[in-house]
Image: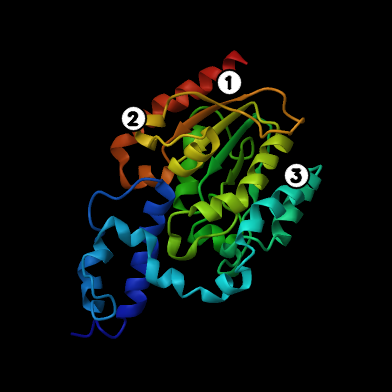
């Protein structure tokens, strides 16, 4: 009977961790999270007791709309964000300049609720650029992509085919953590897309690895789910008007490592995908 005392902290910690895994994975959960039983105690706040344990919970609509200050600050300018992003991105002639442009960009409402801008880590030594979905809790704290449990798994995955974490270049579709780790919205992606496209142009990767549904769909302009896309080589076509890239870039969608932490049975398919990547690298 003493559980109600620390209940809020326990619920917040458990929910944050569980939602982060599912949000980063790019797929919908197939079963209620373990914390659903505990969360039922807070049902008076959220009358729909099914929502906390259901996939819809990832959207966390009510908590998100608490972020009204950022909405009012950018109200009327959200449609201008993609245009402003394109202008700033086009003006960047180096990755360092692009990073500065992203850090100074105010057109994405996510920035108002995030602790840090999460840009990139690693190097282009191997020619492999990995694009994930969005920063999670640990990434937001440290200001670097893929530094939590999923990042550690990502490092092990690529080490298994001979690629050290310092040899690969890692970034995300979004540069700021969505509140409560909700799924990226279309406006989030629209605000960041020009920066991502310019990032690819400046990094000049030999191969793109797209970790998760969000990046795979956005980069390959597809509506297919990650279950269908993973392991199938596609081609990224540079943005119109970008003269720094004349050719398409091979792109390989894979499961997000956070998904593999929850669904280890899918590691076998991912291993095949990694072998396919290694073969492509060896072929030059």
| Residue 33 sits above or below residue 262 on the image | below
Local secondary structure at mark 1: helix
Local secondary structure at mark 3: helix
Q: Position of residue 94 (x, y in %)?
A: 79, 43
Residue drawn at (61%, 46%) of the image: 193
Tell me the distance, in whole angstroms, between the alpha carbons under discs 2 and 3: 35 Å
Q: Position of residue 38 (x, y in %)?
A: 23, 71
Tell me the distance, in whole angstroms, between the alpha carbons under discs 1 and 2: 20 Å
Q: Quadrant of the C terminus?
A: top right
In this rendering, does residue 78 appear at all?
yes
Neighbour class for label 3 at 10 Å: few (<14), some, many (≥20)?
A: some
Which is nearer the N-term, disc 3 or disc 1? 3
Local secondary structure at mark 2: helix
Q: Which residue is mark 2?
A: 268
Which is nearer the N-term, disc 1 or disc 2? 2
Q: Which residue is mark 3?
A: 95
Tell me the distance, in whole angstroms, between the alpha carbons under discs 3 and 1: 24 Å
Q: Position of residue 134 (x, y in %)?
A: 52, 52
Q: Position of residue 99 (x, y in %)?
A: 73, 52
Residue drawn at (61%, 57%) of the image: 79
User: Of 109 and 124, which appears nearest the observer?
Assistant: 109
């Amino acid at each position: 009977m003493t559980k109600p005392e620390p209940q809020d902290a326990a619920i917040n910690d458990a929910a944050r961790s569980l939602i982060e895994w599912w949000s980063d994975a790019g797929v919908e959960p197939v079963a209620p999270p373990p914390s659903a039983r505990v969360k039922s105690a807070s049902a008076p706040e959220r009358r729909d007791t099914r929502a906390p344990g259901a996939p819809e919970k990832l959207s966390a609509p009510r908590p998100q709309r608490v972020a009204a200050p950022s909405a009012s600050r950018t109200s009327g300018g959200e449609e201008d964000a993609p245009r402003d992003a394109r202008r700033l991105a086009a003006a960047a002639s180096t990755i360092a300049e692009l990073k500065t442009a992203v850090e100074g960009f105010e057109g994405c409402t996510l920035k108002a609720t995030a602790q840090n801008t999460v840009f990139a880590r690693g190097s282009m030594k191997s020619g492999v650029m990995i694009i994930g979905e969005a920063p999670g809790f640990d990434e937001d704290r440290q200001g670097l992509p893929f530094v939590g449990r999923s990042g550690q798994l990502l490092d092990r995955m690529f080490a298994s085919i001979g690629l050290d974490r310092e040899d690969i270049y890692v970034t995300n579709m979004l540069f700021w953590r969505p509140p409560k780790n909700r799924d990226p919205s279309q406006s989030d992606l629209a605000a960041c897309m020009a920066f991502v496209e310019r990032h690819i142009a400046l990094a000049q990767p030999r191969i793109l690895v797209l970790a998760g549904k969000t990046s795979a769909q956005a980069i390959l302009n597809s509506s297919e789910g990650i279950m269908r896309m993973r392991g199938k080589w596609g081609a990224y076509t540079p943005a119109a008007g970008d003269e720094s890239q004349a050719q398409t870039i091979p792109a390989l969608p894979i499961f997000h490592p956070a998904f593999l932490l929850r669904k280890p049975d899918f590691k076998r398919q991912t291993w095949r995908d990694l072998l396919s990547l290694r073969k492509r690298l060896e072929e030059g």
